[in-house]
Image (tube, rainbow, N blue to C red):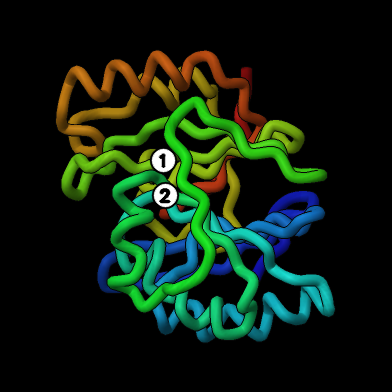
């Protein structure tokens, strides 16, 4: 676990044969939210650290961008520890969550639909997840200007605790057909992203980004 920014904790697994890093993030505000549940193994390793950070405070939300094991595989373990947990996800992901053993509360959101709860002010962007091009979501927390970008800004390498500085518009422009193979969907996403002004990208894989400009 690394405290990577104010109130933001990163939980990571680096896989040397793939030169690949998988991250989850806890934004410890009121209420607390976890971005990505991790696989079952990752969630089991993360839980003691989550409990140490949160103490008696509950984990209220988990945001699940799209339906993959590193996003949702550990949900049932988190639900077991935090029975009042609520998952935030898009429509397709929401209906598939029981496949990972999750039986708890779900809030379904689409791009453009907000969610506000005390210190949290979340907005969402539709994200054509590259695995199967089903609609997933990206989450932007407006108070902290934090964008959880799932797989969109993926980089290889050991990204544990690592932050690089990049120009935001350049990052948007470098989204290619490996990230979003459908050209029309890619351009629509890039147009939406250009209107954001994130200060920090919490990436699903690779190196987090302090945004310039």
Task: Say whether residue 107 is left or right of residue 40.
Answer: right
Seen at 80% across and 44% down, the residue is 119
Mark 1 and 2 residues: CB-CB less than 8 Å, in contact? yes
Q: Using the rendered view, name the quadrant where residue 80 is placed.
A: bottom right
Residue 99: give x, y in percent of width and height.
28, 72
Residue 93: give x, y in percent of width and height.
33, 53
Numbered badge on residue 204: none
Which quadrant holds the C terminus? top right
Task: Say whether residue 210 is left or right of residue 93.
Answer: right
Residue 123: give x, y in percent of width and height.
58, 32
Q: Nearer the viewer, residue 155 or 121?
A: 121
Name the residue carrying label 2: 65
Seen at 50% across and 82% down, the residue is 77
Q: Nearer the viewer, residue 107 or 196?
A: 107
Question: If you read the primary sequence from the N terminus, does the residue marked by circle 1 or circle 2 appear first?
Answer: 2
Q: Quick one: label 2, few (<14), some, or many (20+) residues within 10 Å?
A: many
Q: Using the rendered view, name the quadrant where residue 209 is placed.
A: top right
The relative height of residue 183 versus residue 107 in the rendered view (above or below) is above
The relative height of residue 148 versus residue 31 in the rendered view (above or below) is above
Q: Quick one: label 1, few (<14), some, or many (20+) residues within 10 Å?
A: many
Q: Nearer the viewer, residue 26 or 31?
A: 31
Seen at 37% across and 40% down, the residue is 152
Which quadrant holds the N terminus? bottom right
The relative height of residue 86 versus residue 132 in the rendered view (above or below) is below
Q: Secondary structure at mark 1?
A: strand
Q: What is the tally of numbered marks visible in this picture?
A: 2
The relative height of residue 142 versus residue 170 in the rendered view (above or below) is below
Q: Secondary structure at mark 2?
A: loop
Numbered badge on residue 137: 1
Seen at 59% across and 47% down, the residue is 163
Rounded to the nearest whole Å, what is the CA distance between mark 1 and mark 2? 5 Å
């Amino acid at each position: 676990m690394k405290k990577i920014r104010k109130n933001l904790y990163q939980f990571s697994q680096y896989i040397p044969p793939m030169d690949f890093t998988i991250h989850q993030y806890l934004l410890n505000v009121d209420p607390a939210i976890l971005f990505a549940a991790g696989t079952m193994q990752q969630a089991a390793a993360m839980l003691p650290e989550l409990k140490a950070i949160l103490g008696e405070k509950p984990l209220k939300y988990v945001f699940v961008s799209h339906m993959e094991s590193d996003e949702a595989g550990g949900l049932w373990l988190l639900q077991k520890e935090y029975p009042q947990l609520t998952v935030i996800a898009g429509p397709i992901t929401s209906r598939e969550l029981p496949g990972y053993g999750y039986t708890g509360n779900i809030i379904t959101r689409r791009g453009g639909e907000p969610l506000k709860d005390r210190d949290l002010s979340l907005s969402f962007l539709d994200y054509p997840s590259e695995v199967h091009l089903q609609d997933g979501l990206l989450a932007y927390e407006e108070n902290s200007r934090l964008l959880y970008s799932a797989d969109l800004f993926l980089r290889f390498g050991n990204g544990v605790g690592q932050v690089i500085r990049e120009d935001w518009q350049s990052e948007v422009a470098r989204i290619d057909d490996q990230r979003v193979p459908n050209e029309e969907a890619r351009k629509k996403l890039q147009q939406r992203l250009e209107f954001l002004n994130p200060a920090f990208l919490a990436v699903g894989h690779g190196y987090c980004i302090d945004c310039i400009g």
